[in-house]
Amino acid sequence: MTRIPVRRALVSVYDKTGLEELARGLHESGVEIVSTGSTAGSIAALGVPVTPVAEVTGFPEILGGRVKTLHPHVHAGLLADQGNPEHVSTVDELGIATFQLVVVNLYPFRETVASGATPAEIVEQIDIGGPAMVRSSAKNHNSVAIVVDPGSYIEVLQAVAAGGFDLITRQRLAGQAYAHTAAYDAAVANWFGQQAVLADAQAAVGIEGGENTTSNWPPYVGVALERAEVLRYGENPHQRAALYVQQGAEPGIAQAEQVHGKAMSFNNYVDGDAAYRAAFDFDEPCVAIIKHANPCGIATGADVAQAHAKAHACDPISAFGGVIAVNRPVTPAMAEQVADVFTEVILAPAFEPAALELLSTKKNLRLMVVRGPRPHGAEQRPISGGVLMQDADALDAPGDDPGNWTLACGQALHAGELAELRFAWRAVRTVKSNAILLAKDCASVGVGMGQVNRVDSAKLAVARAGERAAGAFAASDAFFPFADGLQVLLDAGVRAVAQPGGSIRDAEVVAAAEAAGVTMYFTGTRHFAH
Ligand SMILES: NC(=O)c1ncn([C@@H]2O[C@H](COP(=O)(O)O)[C@@H](O)[C@H]2O)c1NC=O
């Protein structure tokens, strides 16, 4: 493989991490370093020889740094194919020296947006010259190696000392470089999109009839995904699969840190995500046990061990091979309970040392550290040929506060009972629609999920609860279109029901509850989850 010896390098970095080692190493290998303003200043301060880029261009940096490397003496030096005799003679005639290595990292655009800077400050942090150099060098990877990641300087110095970069490495670096500028431009485009949304919203204020409905979503959304892991297989063994993390996204399970166990599978991630969302919906210590993206047990408790015991008791048969999420650090007491049950994954914000030690003896159990709370931004759902976007179904709708519920029939519940019904209401939204959840003592006791009619979901919940259905607190993720589904719950002896209300047959539904002497609240909010 042909290596291209590095004689001349262009270094222009905003992030000066590792710059000292890089500059010293390049100099020791006999490489001439050309550099921009403060990068050159930092290198010179180390006592390492450096040529300021203005000496190469014969032009000062102007417009507050907007123009420093945008010059033919730089870009021809980056773009000349050093294996092409015509290119070589052209640059020779014009007295342009070529580069074999370019090290660039860009102005911190995303960080500046996140810092709450003004639009003018943000715009100034859109790097122009940097991406131009990155793209020129990457295009000309036949002659130039382009490095955008301060984490790869050691590899860079090794390659330089070994006689230069081979073609495969230059191609790989070029790919990384284009991914880097693409992600950067996507972040810039997304910011401009957000500005457009804000401008539209401001323009809509005062328009009679109110709200701006057309432009609440940006005209373009750039998503940059970086492969974090190749998975053994997908949902089934014949499907290939990989995990990608979304750059700039709120951290979630894709960014979780594995502290024990074999590699996560595709299904572990899917179930883990459902478990994470469920457990982190609660402020109290909460444990959710998930199978096939649905809870087979969810409970809150005084501590995580109690919450786990209650969640497990909901459906011990289904809990076998489950994925567990907990919204507090795992304690030794909880770890002892879990150790007795075959479990695929536990996700938690932390594991107490003794818990970690105990659970680490289980070689098939995966332990993942996740940072809560669950992401609240917009959610994407791929469909064939596109993506649907929606606001995350946060638990902040008026109907999520029992204080806003309407008593449809029966005696108002006292505070303790209302807390039970509130638990059922919060927990049911983690269940795939049609969803019916029966709870007692702030623990699910029967869950009916994913049925194509509400009657079957009710039957399933009641069947799973068995005797526990009597006196249970029931929640339905959407209204009862007829009284039949509710009747299943009433016949099983539930104590109270929370449901959105809003069916054209509400009167029939309420009459059925009233006849059974059961309290029913309308929440006014629906929580479908598909
Ligand atoms: N305008 C230009 O010609 C230009 N050339 C390089 N840059 C950026 O300037 C930064 C380095 O500048 P300095 O060495 O002055 O800290 C790098 O992030 C680089 O991407 C430029 N800045 C912005 O566009």
Image: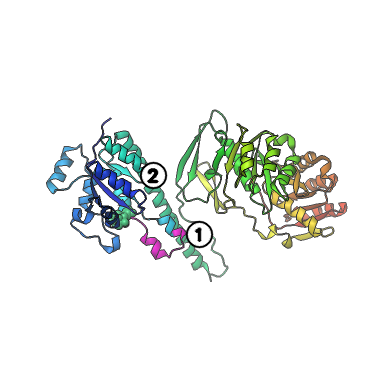
Q: Image quadrant for the C terminus?
A: top right
Of the residues shown, which amino acid type is indicated by label 2? Gly
Position of residue 271 in the picture relative to residue 193 (left or right): right
Q: What x and y, as percent, mark residue 97?
A: 18, 46
The magenta-colored residue range is 113-127
State whether residue 128 appears in this view: no
Whether disc 2's CB lies below 8 Å from ligand 1 is answered no
Which label is found at residue 151? 2
Q: Secondary structure at mark 1?
A: loop
Task: Please tell me which of labels 1 and 2 falls first in the chain.
Answer: 2
Q: What x and y, as percent, mark residue 444?
A: 75, 45
CA distance separating discs 1 and 2: 40 Å
Asked where in the image residue 398 lies, by quadrant, the reply is bottom right
Q: Verify whether residue 117 appears in magenta.
A: yes
Q: Crowding at label 1, few (<14), some or many (≥20) Cα neighbours within 10 Å?
A: some
The residue that mark 1 highlights is 215
Which label is found at residue 410? none
